[in-house]
Image (tube, rainbow, N blue to C red):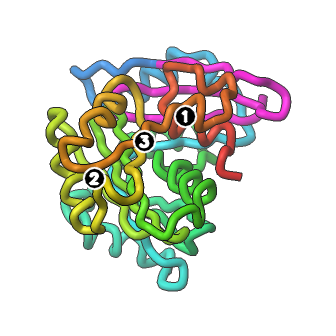
Amino acid sequence: MDSLTIRISTDRIIFATYDRLRNMLPEYVVCDNNPDISLNANTHQAIKGTPMAQQDYNFVDIFTGGPTLIVPLKEFDEDDAPDLYYFNYPTLRGRTKVYYDTLPYLNALLLFSMDRDVSNTLLDYFPTAKFHCHLTALIRQWVARYPFSSSLPRLYCYLCESRLTLVVVEQAQLQFVNTYNIHNPTDSLYYIAGIAQRFGLSADGERTYVGGFGPEATNLANNLSRINLSAFFMDDKEELSHHPIAEIEDFPYDLKVHLLKAYE
């Protein structure tokens, strides 16, 4: 195996190796983070304690979350990316490193950042690693799979590890994306109601698409009627054509989409 995928979040770190042309299922290890130590310390411990992570790989992809910024491709200058990002998120300056992913269907780039210490640690272990955002695979999947299915705006709600990401797509064009920290179930309804009002969404129009990790996403879908929205729950198995990877409960949907390259 010449490729390693690492998904990092505040809750856990997942290591996976997968050749989709040869195997139906990946090999993987999940390391739950210790909340009493920093994410950087957890990263050191996870790598040192995982034999899979200590092998040599030609390709290493590292996925992270955090605030994002969409930039039109025609307006992008790589040298200006940090200043542009920190203009929108000034409190992160000095604490993070800025990276970007391309969104080819949208002629745009997705800027994101990672804790500077964690990023340096990962590069010490994996000097040629490429950094990506959790959201990149999801946005590419949603736009590619449902490009012109409706003339109405379509709202996607992705609830995973106490973070709610809202994405609005209309006629294959990205209209909105933002991520919110969720402290209780009503927080999600509050944020979704605000975006639904902004884009004129209601139960009489396009359904609101809900996915995520764990039972929280199902509960969210069941409660959208409280804010006058009609929900469609995006079950992993249905969305990924019942591929065996869809059955892995340890994997968030964004990781499943990336491993399968479902958007291609």
Residue 193 occupies which quadrant of the picture?
bottom left
**Residue located beneath label 2 in the image:** 95
Mark 2 or mark 1, which is nearer the start of the sequence? Answer: 1
Q: Residues within 10 Å of mark 3 (few under 14, many from 20)?
A: some
> What's the magenta region?
1-30
Between marks 3 and 2 in the image, the one whose residue lies nearer the viewer: 3
- Amino acid marked by disc 1: Ile
Q: Residues within 10 Å of mark 2 (few under 14, many from 20)?
A: few
- In this rendering, the label closer to the viewer, 3 or 1: 3
Cα separation between marks 3 and 2: 38 Å
Number of marks present in the image shown: 3
User: Mark 2 or mark 3, which is nearer the start of the sequence?
Assistant: 2
The image quadrant where one finds the N terminus is top right
Residue 91 visible to the viewer: yes
Element type where label 3 sits in the image:
strand
> In the rendering, at what x and y percent does residue 9 appear?
38, 34
Q: Nearer the viewer, residue 202 or 256?
A: 202
Tell me the kind of residue under disc 3. Answer: Phe
Q: Is residue 90 left or right of residue 55?
A: left
| Residue at mark 3 | 232
Q: Position of residue 199 (x, y in %)?
A: 30, 68
Helix, strand or loop status at disc 1: strand
**Residue to which mark 1 is pinned:** 6
Left or right of 45 on screen, residue 83 = left
Q: Residue at x 28, y 57 (%)?
A: 202
Residue at the image position 36 percent from the left and 29 percent from the top: 218
Q: Quadrant of residue 92?
A: bottom left
Amino acid type, callout 2: Arg
Q: Within 10 Å of the Cα at label 1, are there few (<14), some (14-19), or many (20+) other Cα atoms? A: many
Q: Is residue 121 magenta?
A: no
Spot occupied by residue 192 in the image (x, y as percentages of width and height): 24, 51
